[in-house]
Amino acid sequence: FEAIEESPARYVYFGDNISSDVVNPKFFRDYYIPYYKRRSEQLHRKKKYIFLHIDGTLRGVLELVKFTGIDCAQSLTPAPVGDVPLEKFRELAGNDVIIWGGLPGVYFSPRYPPELLKNMMEEIIELYLHDSKFIVGVADEVPPDGDIKRVRMITDIIEENPID
C-alpha cells in the first residue's frame, strides 16, 4: 500500500466490485467501513482521491459508502437493471460522495430499444444536471455487442443540454 501512497497518481481506484447481493450491509459495516476509513485517511493525507467500484444491486450498501471516506461511488447501476431508482442515488449516497454512473451498460446493446437509453439519459439530466458531484457514465461497461451509435447518442444529448 505504501507504493500507492507514494505514487504520483492522484486518483486511486478500489475495484472491489461491491454489490449488496454479495456484500450485505452488516458485512460492509463490520469489515469494509473500517478498512476503507483507514485507507482513505492514509490516501487523503497524500492528497489522493478514492473511487470505489460499486454496481448492480446497491440497496443497503450505497447508503453506507458515506461513512468510509471514499470520495466517489463509481459505476452505480439504476433500476430496473439495479435495485435502486436513479432518483434515490443522491439521497442514499449523501451530499459529499461523488456519484458516477447512471447508464445501464445493457441499454447500449441492440437487444434493448434505444429509447430506454435515451429516456434514462434524459432522466439523469432532469435529476442531476446541476449536481456538481454527479458524473454520468456507463454502469458497468458497454457490452461486447454494444452499439457505438448509442454512445454517440449519449454524447449528442449531453451536448444539447449544457450546464447554465
Image (cartoon, grey):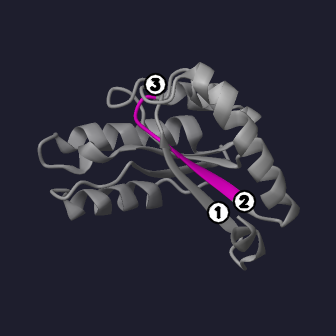
Mark 1: few, some, or many residues within 10 Å (few <14, many ≥20)? some
Magenta stretch in the rendered image: 50-57
Mark 2: few, some, or many residues within 10 Å (few <14, many ≥20)? some
Does residue 134 show up?
Answer: yes
Q: Are marks 2 and 1 in contact (CB under 8 Å)?
A: yes
Type of the residue with mark 2: Tyr
Which numbered dot is residue 85? 3
Q: Is residue 105 above or below residue 160?
A: above
Label 3 – label 1 distance at C-alpha:
27 Å
Secondary element at tag 3: loop
Does residue 164 show up?
Answer: no
Mark 2 or 1, nearer chain start: 1
Type of the residue with mark 1: Val
**Does residue 104 appear to the left or right of 32 in the view shown?**
left
Q: Residue at x 45, y 56 (%)?
A: 158
Q: Position of residue 107 (x, y in %)?
A: 25, 44
Q: Residue at x 82, y 57 (%)?
A: 42
Closer to the camera in the image, 130 or 56:
56
Mark 3 or 1, nearer chain start: 1
